[in-house]
Amino acid sequence: MPHLTRTAWGTASTDVRIGFGIPGFAHPLVAAAEWSELTRPGTPLKWVVLNVANGPGERPDPHCLEAAGRLRNAGVRVLGHLDMTYGARPFGELVSDAHRYLDWYQVDGFSLDRCPTERAALPEVRRTVATLRALIDDAHIVLGHGTHPYPGYAETGDQLVTFTGPWSDYRWSQVAEWTADYPPERFCHFVHGMPRGHLEEALRIARWQGASTIYFTDRVGDGGTNAPWESMPGYWDEIVSRIGTGVSE
């Protein structure tokens, strides 16, 4: 059995209203069906990451602009992908990419992929996030740690990705005790290589661990940063129907 926990939010943790966060589909020319599917009414979607070329690219892309516009018109947040490379990326480069995303695609916030997790890096991440928030009113900031970071990061981002990895790890994963001090809306889990037959079990783990934003897929990576997420899972319709319509935000 996976590790189960009751949070400070009580038994309500099993009644978490789950919705999707999309880590980043392939380019709209390659994954046209995926981008189109996201605007289907009733899809429980919280946000979608726009990753043009491991960032905003060198010039505006009309296909990405059209895809982002359709999502915004449907009331879906679009987040720009910023790769922090675990703290190695210079501050100026991150801010420059953020400006391009805002100028070219009118994003609603940012997903900071490969975000550092350690306490020592927290001041620089805070500086980056404060600068990003100054660019956009009500910017939505997702810190893509992929694992449980030092607890102080929870006061910096709107949401934290506290699990990114294969189903073989997720099914035995444990949640950090400090997460019980925060509502499920603060946490995201991204799981790849998950067979259809384990869908209900995976949703149960997310609810018990207090994560209300998820993306589960049967796709597996081939070494690329976003490879498992570039296309929809084979059971997309099933997971949409299990989660139901509408989101809690």
Image (tube, rainbow, N blue to C red):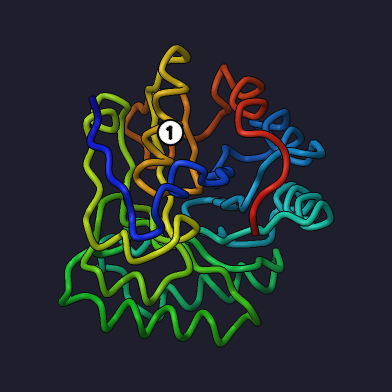
In this rendered view, identify the residue nearer to me: 3 or 173: 3
In this rendered view, identify the residue nearer to me: 197 or 58: 197
Q: Measured along the vertical axis of the image, is residue 28 above or below residue 59?
A: above
Residue at the farthest front position: 11
Residue 15 showing in the rendered view: yes
Q: Measured along the vertical axis of the image, is residue 44 above or below residue 117?
A: above
Q: Taking 216 as reference, is 165 left or right?
A: left
Residue at the (66%, 49%) spot, across then down: 247
Residue at the (68%, 39%) spot, across then down: 28
In this rendered view, identify the residue nearer to me: 194 or 205: 205
Residue 246 location in percent, x, y? Answer: 72, 45
In this rendered view, identify the residue nearer to me: 60 or 113: 113
Residue 180 sits in which quadrant? bottom left
Q: Taking 118 as reference, is 111 left or right?
A: right
Please identify the quadrant where the N terminus is shown.
top left
Which residue is denoted by mark 1 in the rendering? 227
Q: How many marks?
A: 1
Residue 155 location in percent, x, y? Answer: 37, 76
> Mark 1, residues whose alpha carbon is within 10 Å: few (<14), some, or many (≥20)?
some
Residue 117 sits in which quadrant? bottom left
Considering the numbered disc 1 on the image, is that residue within a helix, a strand or a loop?
A: helix
Residue 50 location in percent, x, y? Answer: 59, 52
Residue 23 showing in the rendered view: no
Please identify the quadrant where the C terminus is shown.
bottom right
Residue at the (41%, 18%) spot, across then down: 198
Q: Amino acid at mark 1?
A: Ala
Residue 37 sits in which quadrant? top right
Q: Taking 154 as reference, is 186 left or right?
A: right
Residue at the (82%, 39%) spot, across then down: 41
